[in-house]
Amino acid sequence: MAQAKQAKITKKTKTSTKTYHNFIGGEWVKSSTGEWFDNVNPADTSDIVGRFPNSTADDVNAAVSAAKNAATKWRRTPAPKRAELLFRLGEILRANKDRYTQEMTREMGKVLKEAGGDVQEAIDCTYYTAGEGRRLHGFTTPAEMPNKFAMCVRQPVGLCGLITPFNFPMAIPSWKLIPALVCGNTVVIKSGEDVPLSALNLVKACEQAGIPKGVVNLVNGFGDAGAALVDHQDVRLISFTGSTDTGRKIAEACARDNKIVSLEMGGKNAIIVMDDADIDNAVEGSLWGAFGTSGQRCTASSRLVVHKKVYKKFVQKLVERVKALRVGNGLDPKTDVGPVINEDAMQKIHGYIHIGKNIDRATLACGGNLLTKGDYAKGWFIEPTVFTDVKPGMRIGQEEIFGPVTSVIPFSTLDEAIEIVNGVKYGLSSAIYTQDVNKSFYAMQELYTGICYVNSATIGAEVHLPFGGTKGTGNGHREAGTQVLDIFSEWKALYVDYSGKLQKAQIDAVEI
């Protein structure tokens, strides 16, 4: 959590600052303590987006109780009817896209076109998942015994706790919320403390769509609220997206209580640029992959693994383009790269730049400075930064920086490049630029990541394909696609014996 925001907790509200509330049991309510925290614009910290309730375990308990009370009726609502409400939700999101986009950029900092894509992701997820309300397929299968019918169906998990990060303030909550609802679960959302308005907009749209009271609940606040949600005995499932360290703690806590847990954590993604690649296209993809969302993506292209034959040409073109990127307030349509989310993040990223220069001894090709004067004086801005001549084992080549910093690593053979890409503790997204179809398929086979692109950056995924990674990136679950249904539902096997007698499978032999 950001220390800057933690310091702004207060008992009182300013009349000029709009206040927002938790959503519990279908009502918008203050926190039990009456404390609030400021949601500030990271491009201009004098701009207070709103004041939100700083919630405690008491608020979480109330939200869980409301979700528990609503569970039976929602579970018994036919899935196609649940889906009709979700489709209505998609219509509301689409109608309000422009407003949600502006408010997201103001509270999170990403440029308007990216914020619009974030909202569109939520819209796409809602429309796509609503279609599952008339599927949610199980299957039938032949039984071992005569006059016996065998099949399986999905059933809801129960009460779900959803803990979401700052970087995709509406998309990621939608990835969790919408599948949970179509499967018949009730939920409590703990939104990212840096971006509470976007999650609130999503939940308010749920209210407007007619989703019954208590089915969706929203609690704002910091880590204490999240911990209370994880530890609550009535919560059956925790779905978390965030840092690897926090995810590990959540996994340990859920293991003690035998909770289901879905984790989506860090990444140290790489683009391979082969000697036959379209260099201009590879540079364009690297710019977008490394500096989109100011590098604050788990899919960020923080490593560019470039063939030695084209290394000098690639670096020259990349650095030229990076120097031309316009850093500024995301609300300005001319801005290419917005601020990072808060002061803690800025200092952490700048610390990695120091490591790259002074400990790893990589070459700082461009950037590397905090931007603190003039139009940047009230925000958290960092120059887009490129390190070259990076060795795979350097800290900047191994550790997730989560900022506008990328490292260029040379290689000689495709197998060497693949070894470099796979040689980190994460395995979320990878990419290769090449005109050779054989190399493309070989790389797709050998790169041990949950997502792999050919001739594109290490960006995320489309809503109808599974999203997630290998190794330290997560715990094996996938979000999006139909695969997400396996997080938010459990299988039930059903047998109907109409033989009129007891048949003991595996014991009573069937004569042929």
Image (cartoon, grey):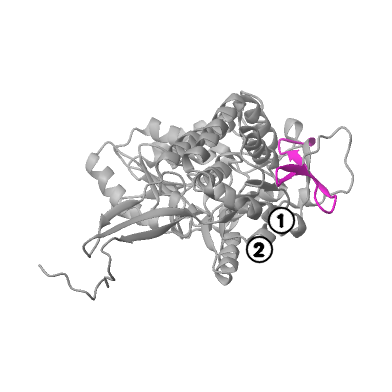
Helix, strand or loop status at disc 1: helix
Residue 243, horizontal then vertical, whole percent:
58, 56
Task: Name the amino acid, label 1.
Answer: Val
Q: How many marks?
A: 2
Whether residues under marks 1 and 2 lie with C-beta atoms below 8 angstroms apart, the answer is yes
Split into 4 quadrants, where in the image is the C terminus?
A: bottom left
- The residue carrying mark 2 is 232
Look at the image and say whether residue 365 sits in the magenta stretch.
Answer: no
Q: Main secondary structure of the magenta part?
A: strand
Residue 58: image quadrant is: bottom right
Q: Residue furthest front?
A: 500
Residue 212, horizontal then vertical, whole percent:
63, 41
Q: Is residue 330 left or right of residue 281?
A: right
Looking at the rendering, the stretch of residues picked out in magenta corresponds to 22-48
Crowding at dot 1, Cα within 10 Å, few <14 / some 14-19 / many 20+, comes out as many
Residue 14, horizontal then vertical, whole percent:
88, 37
Residue 305 visible from this viewpoint: no
Q: CA distance from mark 1 to mark 2?
A: 9 Å
Q: Earlier in the sequence, mark 1 or mark 2?
A: 1
Crowding at dot 2, Cα within 10 Å, few <14 / some 14-19 / many 20+, comes out as some
- The residue carrying mark 1 is 60
Most foreground residue, 492 or 360: 492
Helix, strand or loop status at disc 2: loop
